[in-house]
Image (cartoon, rainbow, N blue to C red):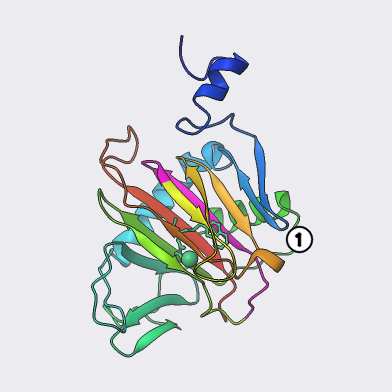
């Protein structure tokens, strides 16, 4: 029997390792939601747009203010893009690698982010930045807060593509206990308001091959940065 047959016992056994039912909404905080499979019906429009963005602004490994090269490779689109180098973390209007403005945010990106925000009870979401993270096997993101954005209550919408990852959803102090939440291809997480400043991270990616994206995980995060 396949694990995602509609058998409640089998579904429960695999709850931590398999995608849950597409369409399921899991509330993980007062104003934080996982929308299982929400992006799946959009992928035929989303993936070509992502290719176009990455052609104009290829993935690169940035250096933290402390001098470490990030294991996650990054790009951005939209009016603002996120950058780090030895002088700090910040948003910029131009890609420091090309000197050009970041690629425009494709309409399908904005429409999907807005639809997901609405599903999580955030109306009128108008993101001006989309960060694109690429994880290969072993890449990770240590516990951090996102605090370079102008509004620290506006929601962030995160879309997971490709290989699954184990997401850490923590509290308001780095030392607070964190929940582990598996994120799969097509899942969207939306968090804002009182949950916006929670610590979070991603455990080292396990090696694998995804039928559509290959040996990687790509995460898009939409923010109101400026
Ligand atoms: C934060 N990215 O780019 S987003 C980042 O999967 C970042 O690439 C991770 O953290 C990634 O800054 C995680 C998913 C996420 C989900 C729920 C959260 C981040 C969250 C809840 C509270 C705070
Ligand atoms: Fe983050």
Q: Which residue is depicted at the point 58% across and 66% down?
A: 198
Residue 85: x and y in percent read 30, 83
Asked if 209 appears above or below 12 in the picture, the reply is below
Q: Which residue is depicted at the point 72% across and 53% down?
A: 118
Q: Secondary structure at mark 1?
A: loop
Asked if 172 appears above or below 40 in the picture, the reply is below
Quarter of the rendering containing residue 22: top right
What is the span of residues highlighted in magenta in the rendered image? Answer: 151-165
Magenta stretch contains residue 15: no
Image quadrant holding the C terminus, namely: bottom right
Residue 87: x and y in percent read 32, 90
Q: Is 87 left, or right, of 4 in this rendering?
A: left
Residue 225: x and y in percent read 56, 77
Magenta stretch contains residue 153: yes
Quarter of the rendering containing residue 76: bottom left
Quarter of the rendering containing residue 26: top right
Asked if 25 appears above or below 72 in the picture, the reply is above
**Residue behind mark 1:** 123
Residue 170: x and y in percent read 55, 60
Toward the viewer: 124 or 8?
8
Residue found farthest to the bottom? 87
Toward the viewer: 15 or 119?
15
The answer, for residue 101, to whether it is visible in the render is yes
């Amino acid at each position: 029997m396949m694990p995602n047959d509609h058998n409640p016992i089998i579904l429960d056994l695999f709850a931590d390792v398999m995608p849950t039912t597409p369409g399921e909404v899991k509330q993980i905080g007062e104003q934080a939601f996982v929308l299982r499979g929400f992006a799946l019906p959009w992928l035929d429009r989303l993936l070509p747009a992502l290719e176009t963005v990455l052609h104009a602004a290829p993935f690169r490994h940035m250096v933290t203010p402390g001098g470490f090269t990030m294991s996650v490779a990054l790009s951005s689109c939209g009016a603002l893009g996120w950058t780090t180098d030895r002088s700090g973390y910040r948003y910029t209007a131009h890609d420091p690698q090309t000197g050009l403005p970041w690629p425009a945010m494709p309409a399908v990106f904005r429409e999907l982010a807005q639809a997901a925000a609405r599903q999580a009870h955030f109306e009128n979401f108008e993101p001006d930045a989309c960060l694109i993270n690429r994880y290969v096997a072993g890449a990770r993101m240590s516990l951090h807060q996102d605090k370079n954005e102008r509004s620290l209550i506006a929601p962030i919408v995160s879309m997971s593509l490709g290989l699954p990852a184990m997401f850490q959803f923590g509290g308001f102090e780095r030392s607070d206990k964190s929940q582990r939440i598996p994120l799969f291809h097509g899942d969207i997480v939306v968090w804002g308001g009182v949950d916006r400043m929670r610590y979070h991270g991603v455990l080292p990616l396990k090696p694998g091959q995804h039928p559509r994206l290959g040996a990687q995980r790509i995460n898009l995060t939409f923010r109101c940065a400026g």
